[in-house]
């Protein structure tokens, strides 16, 4: 009889756990979908602000005139050259949260000015990895995600031509994007009044891009998450690829949701989106352990209560028999 009671208690607790678990899955997925839409808006805002600032630079007459002086004046000790250089340095040294560096590159590929001193004097020709566009197309550009040849980190570089009075290209103005700032922007918790708001601080939101046919990684310069410590001097030359069912599907241009193992092989509930405007995958996930802890707690309570009741009842019967 004791065995039968224990079996019944275990079965009831198991059914309760499954029922409570199933009841919370759909609301959680719907909540993650709402968070995903908010993250898409955040990414759009970040890129739109970036493009607006760059557009302002490209249409600024003083920037254009001083840039042309640097690109056409070969004597870098001349007063005009020095004045133009200092003007641009002061202008672009203002804090740009979304930029790592602003640079001027000649048609031959030499960096003659940069807010990153290490780039000046370096050979940096425009390649297909650079997102090259004309001013009138700035709102329609799709950024190229690539691996830097110098530090091996993920990069996005925007470049636009600078024209002289004869409409001849004399060089390009480039900006290297601060992908870590974008990453932090996307990972910020959002405010919520939903019943599942206790999950807000436990949700992981991140962007993943393709560096090559075989390598997927975070859209960030600080590309270590959990056990994936990839941004170090020892192993920065080799970036391990991130894989999960959500990442693979999203980078396959799919949109969906489900229960799967994330890139750290941890069970999660997740929503994934393909962002064609940036060619990124956006993933919003929460660990299943966080979602199902209440179901486990209730089932555990039921099992322990049933177990205690069974033991007490068995002791009472034993005492009666004695």
Image (spheres, grey):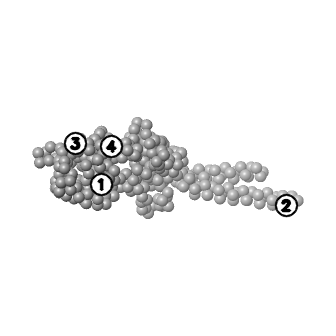
- Of the two numbered discs 3 and 1 on the same chain, state the one appearing first in sequence: 3
| Residue 138 x/y as whole percent | 24, 48
Left/right placement of residue 22 relative to residue 208 reads: right
Query: Mark 3 and 2 residues: CB-CB less than 8 Å, in contact?
Result: no
Residue 154: x %, y % from top left: 39, 46
Distance between the Cα atoms at labels 3 and 2? Answer: 98 Å
* Marked residue nearer the N-terminal end (1 or 2): 1
Which marked residue is nearer to the observer: mark 1 or mark 2?
1
Tag in front: 3 or 4: 3
Residue at mark 4 to residue at mark 1: CA–CA distance: 22 Å
Give neighbour class at mark 2: few <14, some 14-19, many 20+ (Cα, 10 Å).
Answer: few
Secondary structure of the residue carrying tag 2 is helix
Q: Is residue 150 above or below residue 99?
A: above
State which mark lies toward you, 3 or 2: 3
Residue 198 visible here: yes
Q: Please state the horizontal and vertical placement of residue 268, each as a whole percent of the image.
A: 51, 49
Residue at image mark 3: 107
- Residue corresponding to mark 1: 115
Closer to the camera, 277 or 221?
221
* Label located before the other in sequence (3 or 4): 3
Q: Residue at x 40, y 48 (%)?
A: 219
Q: Nearer the viewer, mark 2 or mark 4?
A: 4
Residue annotated with mark 2: 319
**Viewer-nearest residue: 290 or 91:** 91
- Name the residue at the front extreme: 77
| Residue 248 falls in image quadrant | top left
Tag 2 or tag 3, which sits nearer the N-term?
Answer: 3
Q: How many numbered callouts?
A: 4
Image disc number at residue 144: 4
Most extreme residue toward the left, as rendered? Answer: 166
């Amino acid at each position: 009889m004791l065995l039968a009671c224990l079996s019944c208690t275990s079965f009831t607790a198991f059914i309760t756990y499954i029922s409570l678990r199933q009841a919370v899955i759909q609301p959680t997925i719907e909540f993650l979908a709402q968070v995903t839409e908010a993250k898409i808006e955040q990414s759009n805002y970040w890129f739109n602000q970036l493009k607006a600032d760059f557009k302002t630079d490209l249409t600024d007459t003083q920037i254009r005139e001083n840039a042309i002086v640097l690109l056409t004046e070969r004597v870098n000790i001349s007063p005009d050259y020095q004045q133009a250089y200092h003007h641009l340095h002061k202008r672009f040294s203002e804090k740009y949260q979304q930029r790592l560096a602003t640079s001027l590159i000649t048609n031959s590929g030499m960096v003659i000015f940069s807010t990153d001193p290490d780039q000046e004097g370096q050979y940096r020709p425009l390649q297909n990895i650079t997102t090259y566009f004309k001013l009138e197309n700035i709102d329609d550009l799709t950024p190229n995600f690539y691996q830097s040849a110098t530090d091996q980190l993920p990069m996005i570089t925007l470049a636009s031509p600078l024209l002289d009075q004869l409409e001849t290209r004399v060089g390009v103005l480039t900006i290297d994007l601060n992908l870590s700032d974008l990453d932090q922007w996307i990972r910020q918790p959002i405010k919520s009044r939903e019943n599942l708001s206790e999950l807000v601080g436990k949700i992981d939101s991140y962007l993943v891009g393709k560096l090559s046919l075989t390598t997927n990684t975070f859209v960030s310069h600080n590309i270590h998450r959990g056990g994936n410590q990839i941004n170090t001097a020892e192993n920065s030359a080799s970036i391990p690829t991130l894989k999960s069912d959500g990442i693979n599907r999203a980078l396959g241009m799919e949109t969906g949701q489900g229960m799967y193992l994330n890139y750290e092989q941890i069970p999660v509930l997740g929503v994934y989106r393909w962002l064609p405007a940036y060619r990124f995958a956006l993933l919003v996930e929460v660990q299943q352990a966080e979602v199902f802890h209440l179901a486990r707690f209730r089932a555990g309570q039921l099992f322990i209560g049933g177990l205690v009741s069974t033991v007490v009842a068995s002791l009472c019967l034993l005492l009666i028999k004695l």
